[in-house]
Every structure is written in structure tokens, then in C-alpha cells.
Image (cartoon, helix red, strand yellow):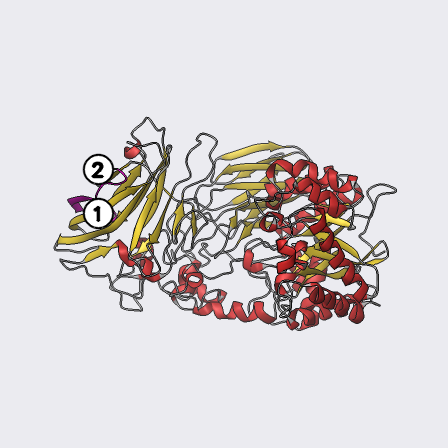
Amino acid sequence: MLAGAVAAAEGEPPRQLFAHYMGCFPAGRGATAHHRREQAALRHDAADMATALGGRTRNWPLVPDGADLSPQASAELEIRRALRAGVDGFAMDAWAGDNGAKATLDALFAAAEAARLPFQLTICIDCSCLPANRDVPGDNTAAVAEAVAWLIQRHGNSPNLARRQGRPLIFGYSSYAIRQDAAMKALPEGPEKWQKTVDAYREVERRAGTPLFIHYCLAHYGHHAKPQQPAPFADYVAFMARNFGAVGVFLDSEIPRDQRAGVAAAVTAAGAEWSQPLWYQYENMLGSLEAGDGTAGLRARWEQAIATRSALIQFVTWNDYGENTNLAPGYQTNYALTALNAHYAAWWKSGREPVPQRDWAMVSFRRYPAGATTFPFRSRRSAAGEIEVVALLTAPASLRLPGRGAERPLAAGLVVERFPLVPGPVAVELVRDGVVALRLESPEPVAAEPFREDNGIYAISSDHDAQWAADFGFTPPLRIGEYGDCDRDGLPDWFEMYWQKRWLDQGARTQLDPASDPWGAGRTLRESCRQRKDPTRPDPVYAPGFTWDLGAIPARKASFNPDHDQQGMPVWSYLYRHAAFAEDGRAGAFLPCPHAAPSTPYTGPFAHLSPSQDPQWKQIHGWTCWNRTGADGPWHFEMRPRREALIALGWTSPVAGRVRLALRAGAAGDALRLSLRDPAGAIAAERVLRPGEDEAALEAALDCTPGARLLVIADAAGGTGGGHARISSLSLELLAPTPRTTP
């Protein structure tokens, strides 16, 4: 047994922590290095959604600028970092990255063997990344067997091949997917079907020529269990635990909420090892968002692992930078999470909380408050956050956040404190007897005006420079602060890098003169920055008769919050407000809808959704979306309020002048009220819409100034909360601009 596999108590299985490794994303080389270099060409006005949002990746691998490591150098760096994080091995996703992933796994084995590192390596079966079965679509048994056979034939004699109970250890992801052929799908959910899944893995063992220790992943059970033939999840868990060495799941959300507490006990009672889900956030720019609450989720899952005596864990993930789940050091999380994870891993393995031998602190936060508008990149959603300080203290101390008026006493040991997320610099001081014992200054402030959507946490720790030196010696430490201003000239670092088309080039942060106008925009760079304007373009001109047509959005095949007009100015926004059903909530403040999706099972395309849950309210999950009749029918805009949630479409004026708003709308499902609120907050027009009636017209001429916002509000007044507005047309025409047009 390799070092690091320490049993918490005599007679228990050794406790081992693996991290899910994406072979397509090795640090400092391959695809990550290539795509990192391509970031220089990032454009906010790109046609594709991923680029318009600011790219797919935020948390790039933390390696020296321009690094392109050899395969073995990258592999050894990854392993040594993982060991410092308390990780005992990697489970390579088979095969994300195809043959490149296999080459990366070969390099990891070579590095571990050459340096005699106490580190174990294996694969995690991911059927979505295996070759498809053309003869029997959905039956992945042969492909799984081939992946396992490749591992054993190539590395079966390696001292670094992961084994458990003397057998090769194989992790799983959505393990049911080994059999999803038509015959399997036709079976009702239950023991007969589950046994066929077990039989498929026994066939894998037979073809591999050796018994295997298989970690069965419960993920996506609800995706393949037919609603009309439900089988209790607890029965499914127990069945698999009787047939596999370990049972777990990638994310907690894959376990039905009302059954999470009993799953670990059910697994161990059936004779298998429980594998606690372990992760801290999930941010897929084109997919779902599981916004972490600082390190609270990570700490809570570690505490659950300790309480449930979990024996085998797969951290999700080591290096999926594209989904921002990486434990590996990155541009956003630096070394902070690896140091905190090491503390909990030592606690879990030994059964005793470690006593800090030196003072250590980290600070984490979102880069801007929820609801802030991004420019120049687009945005679809935002998440709330706080500033969180985590410290490991050798003795009691006082905690100060300079410039934030915060000071709190701290006890010795592991302590956590939270503070409001207010824009400004972020620094942490630990003070004893009036003397600063530790100071941590974040290169990243909390920004008031974000330039792109970014809902992952930023984190940095007091041991950053020491950890960097362990990796790269005397190479100057890399401290990425996009909203920082390293030359203190009033232009944020992101502004200087991006507008020079040198995004992520740290050398570009000091190259621009704030008083200059290098691209002939008619403004200095300082003015463009303060006014949030494109410094490469002059102000747009809006002539009389210019029309802002909401109906132009579906043709773009993507919707953001806000959406832009033809001149590139952010004008359309999707908003909500909670209010009691009996009250008139139209006069209150509206917030940006925090969620967006290309579509959902219950909305049309280009959806913007209000929160689904709030402890103070019940019927609140509303949305806007687009829909059409037939594949080629005309589009209509839908607004779906709820009894306690008003939904609004905002139009923010980019011009000073008089505009005329005109819309036509009907109702479906139930009656509701549609109102037009002017920039002063007064209701300029309103109409109760009822199903079955002809479309109603609302029209108003209003004076606007730059930044003034008109609202079209849908609320449930006049109905029961089950209706939605169907707007067939909505436009604003500029009747008469003031002599001086200001966007």
C-alpha cells in the first residue's frame, strides 16, 4: 500500500482521496496552453455565445506566463501539487481527450515512477467519452472493457497503479450508462434491470482477466428511471452496494434531497464503502451553475465525509478548468483551496483535527456583487456572495479587514468569518498584542463594474509565494488580478490587456496612457473607462426614426441580460421583483433575473428566470422567454409572472430625447396585468389581459435621458398567478433626439 492510505481506525478500510483528472487539460501544456494563448483574440462582439460571454474558461492553470511544459514536467508538477493538497491519486477520465488523455496518463505514470512518488493512478469510466457501439447503440460494455484492459496491459505492473483490496481500482461516472441500449431502456426500473448493469461490469472483469475493485457512481439515476415506473432510490443504492466495492456520486444534487442523509448508511450497511461527494462549485459558461458559497460547501462535505466514515473519495475535479471545478491551482483560486483541502484530508485520514503549526489565512469572494451589469462582455446570470476569511491559527488573534471597518476576535485553530461583499480593495490582517502577525493582500479587489460574467469564487492564501516557489523556484510569482490596477494609472488591468487585444498578457497591463485616445474614439481612455464605453469606437449616433425592436433578438440565436441594440449598446434587461399578491408591487425596485438558459423543459427558448426559491416567498419562479407557432411561425415574447413575483422587461435609454413605445399583447392560461412604468416610476399605461380576448395595444410617448429606464411589467393582478403575457410586437421609436446625443 502506498503512503497516504492511512486508516482512521483499526479494522477500517484505508482512507484514500483521489481527484478526477481530465486528460485533455494537463497544466501548462497541450490543449490548456494552446487555448490559453488563443485568449489574446477574445472579442466581446463575437457571434457565438461562449466568446461573447468572455470565453469558456476563467480559472486557467496557475503556471508562469507563456509556459509550455514537457509532458513529464507537467505530470510531475501535477502530482507534487496534488500530494501537497492531501490527494493520494488521480482517476483519469476515460477518455476525455481521446488518445491525448492516454498519453497524459502515460506521462503521469512515468513521472510518478521516475521520482518514486507515493501517488496512485487509475481511470474513471466515462461512457460519454468512449467510442460508440455502432452495432448495438448504447451498449458500452465492450468500450469499457477495452479501456480497463488498456490500463492493465499498459500499467498493470506499475507500483503506482491504484489498487484496493489487492485489485485494480476503477472509478465510475454515471455508472449505469454502461448499458443504455434499447433492450435495457425497455425494462422497468428494478432488480432485473439493475442486475444487467452488474452483469455488464462482470463481463468487463472477465475481459480484463482480473478481478476489479469498482467504484459505482449513482449519478443521473433520475435521468434513466422512467417516471411511470419509479423504483425507490434507496433500493437502487442498496442493490449496487451489495455488488460493488464502493458506491458514491459526483455531486450531492444527484441524490434526491429527502434521501441524502440515509444514503451513506445504506451503502455501508450493504457492505460497500461509501464515497462522499466532494466539490466546491460548478460553473459551465454554456451550461448549469452551482455557485459555491465561498468554501462553505467544501468544508461541509468534508465534515460529512468525516461523520459518515467515508473511506474512498473522488474529488470533482482536479483540473476541469472549463467547468471551474478545479482543485488544482488556478488564476482564480490560486493555492488557497489546495492548502485548505490538505487540512481536511489530514483530519479525515487520521480521525483527528490537525493542530496548526503556523498561522495561515485565505480570503475568498465573488469578484462583484450580484446584479451588477457587465461591459463590454455579455452576461446571462449572476450569483450573490460574501467575503469569507478562513484561518488556521496557532493562538488567538484579532482579525482586521483594513478599509472595511471590520475587526473580530478569533480563537486558535480553524476559524471562519464572513463579511458583506462591498466593492473595494480586499486585505486581511491577523493581529496579536497590537502587532500584525500576518497580512494577506489580495491582488483582486471587489469590483463595482464587472467586464464579464464571472460567478466563480476568487481566492488567495498567505502561503501563495511559498507554494509558487515550491513549484517554480525563483520565477516571479504570478498573482492575477483582473480588476486590479498594477501601475495605479486609473485603468484596470483587464481594460489595458483586453483593448490592446493582448488578453491575459501580463506585460500589457502598463502600456496605455490614460490621457490618450489611441483609436480615435473622441474620448480619452480614462473617459472611456469611467463611462464604460468602447475606446476603439466613437459614440453611436441615433437619428430620428431609429427603432429599437425587441423582435430582432430571436434572430441572434442567443439572449443575454442585458441584450444590446443594433449599435452595440446594452438596452434590454430582464427583471423580477418579489411582492405579496395583495400588494401593488410595481413601484418597487426590480432586480436582474439571476438565471438564463437557451431553453428549459417548461419554457421556450432564450429564457431568463427569476429565483425558484426564497425563504420569505412561495410562488415566485417566473420567467421571460420566446416562443413560436410551428417551425417557421412568427416569434412572440412571453412574460410569466407568479402570485408573488412580478416580471419586467426593461429598456434603458442610450439617448436623450422623446421616444414612443408601442406593444401588442394577449394572455394565455389566466388573466394578468401588463403595465408600462416611466423613468420617474409612474404608471404610464396599463391593461388587464384575459385569455380568449383580442390582443390589446399599449402605447405611450415619453421623454428620456441617457440611462433612464422604462419598464414593461407583468403581474398576476386580475388573475390567480397562472397566466402569461404573449407579446407579438414591442418597439420603441426615437421621435426627437435632443441636439446633443449621448449614448
Q: Position of residue 143 (x, y in %)?
A: 69, 67
Q: Does the image show residue 76? A: no
For the point 36% across and 31% down, which residue is it? 579
User: Does residue 368 lie above or below 465 as drawn?
Assistant: above
Q: Position of residue 708 (x, y in %)?
A: 24, 45
Q: Residues within 10 Å of mark 1 (few under 14, many from 20)?
A: some
| Amino acid at pointer 1 | Arg
Name the element at disc 2.
strand
User: Does residue 124 lie above or below 602 as drawn?
Assistant: below
Image disc number at residue 705: none
Name the element at disc 1.
strand
Q: With 421 as the anchor, is 549 left or right in this view?
A: left
Question: Which residue is the site of mark 2?
Answer: 687
Question: Which residue is the site of mark 1?
Answer: 664
The one nearer the camera, 466 or 100, is: 100
Residue 703: say if magenta.
Answer: yes
For the point 52% across and 55% down, which residue is it? 284
Specify the quadrant of the image occupied by residue 713: top left
Q: Which residues are magenta?
A: 689-707
The one nearer the camera, 267 or 83, is: 267
Specify the quadrant of the image occupied by residue 68: bottom right
Quadrant showing the C terminus: bottom left
